[in-house]
Structures are given as C-alpha cells and as structure tokens.
Amino acid sequence: TGLAHAYDTSRTWFRAEEDFPGPRTMTVAADWLSRHAAHHDRFLLVVDEFDPHEPFDTPAPWAGRYDPDWDAPPIIWPPYAVDGVARGVLTEREGRHLRANYGSKLSMIDHWFGRVLDALERSGRRDDTAVIVCTDHGHYLGERDLWGKPGVPVYAPMGHLPLLVSWPGVAPGRCDALTTTVDLHATLADLFDVTIAHRTHGRSLIPLLTGAESSVREAVLAGYWGREVLVSDGHRTYIRGPAGDNAPLSMWSNRWSTMPIPALPDLRLPRPDDRARLDRMPGSTVPVLRQPFAPGDLLPFWAFDTPPGTRLLYDVDDDPGQEHDLSGTALEVELVELLRAALDDVEAPAEQLVRLGVA
C-alpha cells in the first residue's frame, strides 16, 4: 500500500507550471499523484490543506477579486467577536470586505484542488479511487453578528460541515443522512479491510455511499471541551451547557498541553497536581492522566466564562437559521433523552452527565 501525507506546515508558495504561485500542499499532492499513483495497487494520500483559513490573504490573481472597489489596506484577519458590528468592533462594510477576501481564498483553493483532480485523472486512477473532501469546523463571518470562533454555542455555520465524497461506480447525488468526522476513520478502515484493535465511535459510510442503507446513526454530538454539548437528530438541534459551576469536570489526556493565546503569551495551563490519577480513556484500555478541576481552577482557554444553565433547542427543518428557541417546551424532554442516549453511546464519563444535569 502506498502511503503519503501532504501537510501544509509552512504556508509557503512557489511557482509550478502556472504564471502565478500556488499553495505548496496542493502542488505537492498533485505531483505525488502524477509520479506515483499509477504504480500502486492501493494508496492513501492525505492532503492536510490549512486553507481556507485566516488570514484571508491571497496572491494575484485572487486578491481583491470580489471587492475591487476597496481602496484601503486589505483586512485579512477576522476578529473573534460576539456582536461585532453592534459593538463597533468592525463596520458592516468591513464585514463585507472580510467575506469577499474569504471568497477569494475559497476560489484559489478550489482552483488548486482542481489541479489535484486533474493529476488523478492523468494518472489513470480516477475511476477506481475514492476522493473525500471534508473540514474540521466552520467559521463565523457575520452570521448572528458572530465573527471568527468566539466562545459561543456551536451554531450551524460552525458545526454543519461540508462532506463531499466521490466513490467509484456511484453516480453523483445527495444524501441527507447524519454523519460525523469520526465516521471517516471507520470508512477508511472498512475500505482497506482493517480491523481496529481499540474502541472507536465511527460508523462506516460505505453503506450510505452504495445505497445499501439510508442512515448509519440516529444522532451526532458536537461541542467544545468544558462548554456546551450539542446533539442533533438531523431535524432538531439541542444545545445544553453545565447545570451549575461547570463541574464536575476533568481533563483526560496523555499529552498535557494547551494551545497558546497570542494576546497572553505567558499564560499556560498548570501541570497536573496531586488530584490527578492514572485512568483509562472511557471505553478503552488506553492509559491517560485524569485531572479533575474544581470551581475557581484555571481551565483551558476554550472553557473560559462558560455560562451555566444554557439551554437552546431549534427545529432546523422549519428554522434553519436557528432563530426560534424551543427550550422549555415539551420537546425539550425528548431531546434530553436523545442527549443522554448519545452520551451513553460514546461511553461518556458519568461526571459529564452530572455536569450537564442529565444524569
């Protein structure tokens, strides 16, 4: 089996056969396909392209493509802000400019992804190769006057992810079944006939792709560690935060670190203390440190200021913009049961159910 990775770690640009630069990741991926794809019975190429991502900077001919009348320095860094326009963090005109620059980056990446597909076509492997396009999360660019990735519940622009799959022998079409990113791991394991030795939570999407099944799961979970948890059955979305002081709460990890905050370079998560103990990741035999936290402890930054008692419920069939909160109605009782079942399905720690007030 041929295995290759194309990681965008440098965000550098260089010239290929074009008269303008291209992203290194896409160019390397296309080159690998051109050189090697035809010589393997099976191969897995993982292209980890960082774009589209802030900063929304692009070279010619993409720069300014969708906002040619802008005559000030380009704005390429979206603020991480709630009520950004309402609070004067940016103006509506600046917001339109930001979205235009994001669109330029989308068009650029779309062009170079096309070059990757062209290389696959030229290799002669297009008809027997699965192509999966996905992402890790969305980005707010003015929806609900949210910008960037601020500490708010996971609304649709952040959590409803694109997933495009081209599968050999399957005609183009649409599928509205629920999926989540861990399903991609299960799909690849199924495709390559690999048995996973430890507990995972993914469901293979091959039955959906071939039409053998119309669904592989009843619900999906999303959220941030230490904040609200979201559950959706594809028709209703329920968001529930901690019932009280964001406790009980623990971090389970074998890699004790936290992402840096540029504005607070000296801030680091404290090391495990004498409350920590060796435990097993829920549902597995993988050893990890389990560090409990108490109210008042310094938490990783993504759990800052988590408001207690958050309850949001939306009927996304009738209200795709998630504007009409139905929490507090009889429907919430049903969604609490769905949340509890979804947490049980992934063997969530009992403390998580207690924290959310659904134990």
Image (cartoon, rainbow, N blue to C red):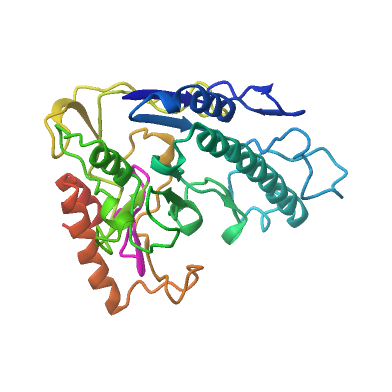
Q: Is residue 290 left or right of residue 20?
A: left
Residue 16 image position (x, y, % from top left): 68, 24
In this figure, what is the number of numbered marks? 0
Residue 30 image position (x, y, % from top left): 55, 29
Q: Nearer the viewer, residue 32 or 232?
A: 32
Q: Nearer the viewer, residue 158 or 261?
A: 158
Residue positioned 66% across, 45% down in the render: 107
Q: Is residue 210 left or right of residue 31?
A: left
Q: Is residue 192 visible?
A: yes
Quadrant location, the N terminus: top left
Residue 111 image position (x, y, % from top left): 64, 41
Q: Which residues are magenta?
A: 224-242
Q: Nearer the viewer, residue 245 or 188?
A: 188
Q: Is residue 212 left or right of residue 93?
A: left
Q: Is residue 241 magenta?
A: yes
Q: Is residue 253 magenta?
A: no
Q: Is residue 143 above or below residue 291?
A: below
Q: Quadrant of residue 108?
A: top right
Quadrant location, the C terminus: bottom left
Residue positioned 50% across, 35% down in the render: 120
Residue 287 image position (x, y, % from top left): 16, 25
Residue positioned 77% across, 28% down in the render: 19
